[in-house]
Image (cartoon, helix red, strand yellow):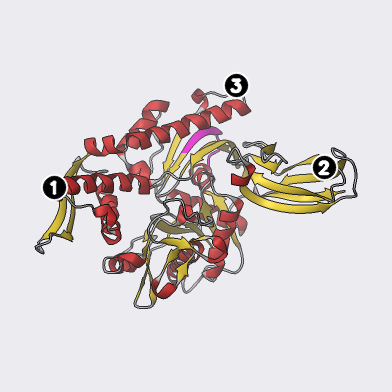
Amino acid sequence: MILGIDLGATNTVGCVWDGKLRMIEITSGGATSLPSVVCIANGAALVGQAAVEAGRMNPDYDYRLWKRRTNEPWHPDEDTGYQTCEGPGGMLAYRGPDGATYLPTELSSYIIGEIVHAANEYLAPHDSVTGAVIGVPATFTPDQVKAVIEAARMAGLENNVTTLEEPVAAAIAGNIDRKKTDCSLVVDFGGSTLDVSILRAGGGLIKVLAKNGIGDLGGADYDKRIAEYVINLFRTEHKRDLSLRDAAMTRLLIEAEGVKKRLTDSEDTLFRVENLDRTPEGVSLHAIYKIDRRIFGELTRDLQERVLSACKAAIDDAKRKDEKFSAADLKSLLLVGGMTRIPSIRSMISEHFNMQPNKSENPEQVVAQGLAIKGAIIEGRKPDVTIADITSHDIAIETTNNVPAIVIPRGSSFPMEKTLVLSTAEDNQAEISVRLLYATRPRAQDCHLLEAREIPVEPAPAETPRVKVTIAVNDEGMPEITNVAA
């Protein structure tokens, strides 16, 4: 049976469809959410709740929130966290004991492996996991998507592994059996990324009208604001700076996440971490402060504004594609991901669009449910859903003056292809370089490189048209150079 896996930054869940949706139980107590935490302790890799417990004693090797760092080059001049270092191939990795390093892909494989193990126990003795559909953010690059598939293979899933963008999976879960076609705003806000999509769904078709989002905005950024607030209070009270102590920062961020979750149901709560530091006389110092929703709102106001800006940008993107589109065309609001439990976020989006979100007791489960349905569709156990998707990024080639020239604009329907005729830049040039990019920055050298080819040509005067190049986006949304004719 193909398993749906929502590989989250803070928690991971699995789901299968065997006539009805069934969330995978991780523990004998019926818990369905696995903390996306790995801890290396006593020479072993602990996963989930076991890692959370071991991490209290081994904070240096307690790994969290690596999802947004998947397949990311190492940049020594950027603040990527005290645990990070340069790994194999110049990629960002996490420091381990005895000089070991762990790529985000490897850490993800531990989580996927644990979910697959739990699913096999849940399905036994009549069935087992034969493949997986894994959710990925709409902001992920092709290299990051490939890294997620590689993580699944490292976890033992050699075949039948595919990915699906998380907002599309949410739309499948919410619209799979609807006959009436409705236009929905899907806001998927998790621990590390924000995805906003506008989809028209119903009658077995899901058409993506627009995508937007922020790849570096998630619950972790809210946790950091709470931790920074406590650090300032502690500094004022004790004249000591906790931000200089890595182990203390890990403990502060863990408690900050707990405070954020408790404020979902309570007006105020206590931030409490004991024995964070000692005075020169050996007296233990604790961080114990009351935090309420008002303080939390003030600390994160600019983050809230970024969330709403991404929602507005998705509307603008849809208007650019169809000038007749307006926000009034939206008939439903689907909020998924743990961050959409926060009352201020739910109310902000609901009030702006004048819509109440679709009811879901567990917004953290919706994506996994859509992934499980997709798995059942792949296996022929459920009627197919046609997904008419669009590109998430501008696709460009690098020009001789280091500027990305857009070939396929963001929001283009795929599969599709476009053919270009390229010319030489200098007299008697022996080859033409074709570098395919995601045009995310003004300078081509700062953009994400998708593919590069060096094409030999016969010597000729400059600006002689010499090469036809076809750029395509395949059925899975992957850009590629499919044909070169000199």
Judging by the rendered image, the residue that carries numbered circle 1 is 237
Q: Position of residue 385 (x, y in %)?
A: 61, 46
Crowdedness near tag 2: few (<14), some (14–19) or many (≥20) residues, C-alpha within 10 Å: few
Judging by the rendered image, the residue that carries numbered circle 3 is 324
The residue mark sitting in front, 3 or 2, is 2
Relative vertical location of residue 4 with respect to residue 333 in this rendering, above or below: below
Dot 1 or dot 2: first in sequence order is 1
Outermost residue toward the front in this view: 427
Amino acid type of the residue tagged 2 in the rendering: Glu
Q: Position of residue 100 (x, y in %)?
A: 45, 72
Outermost residue toward the bottom in this view: 43
* Left or right of 242, for residue 95: right
Quarter of the view holding residue 61? bottom left
Crowdedness near tag 3: few (<14), some (14–19) or many (≥20) residues, C-alpha within 10 Å: few
Label 3 close to label 2 by CB (< 8 Å): no
Judging by the rendered image, the residue that carries numbered circle 2 is 426
Q: Label 2, secondary structure: give it.
A: loop
Amino acid type of the residue tagged 1 in the rendering: Glu
Q: Which residues are magenta?
A: 178-186
Q: Position of residue 228 (x, y in %)?
A: 27, 46
Quarter of the view holding residue 342? top left
Residue 270 visible somewhere in the drawing: no
How many labels sit on residues? 3
Mark identifier at residue 216: none
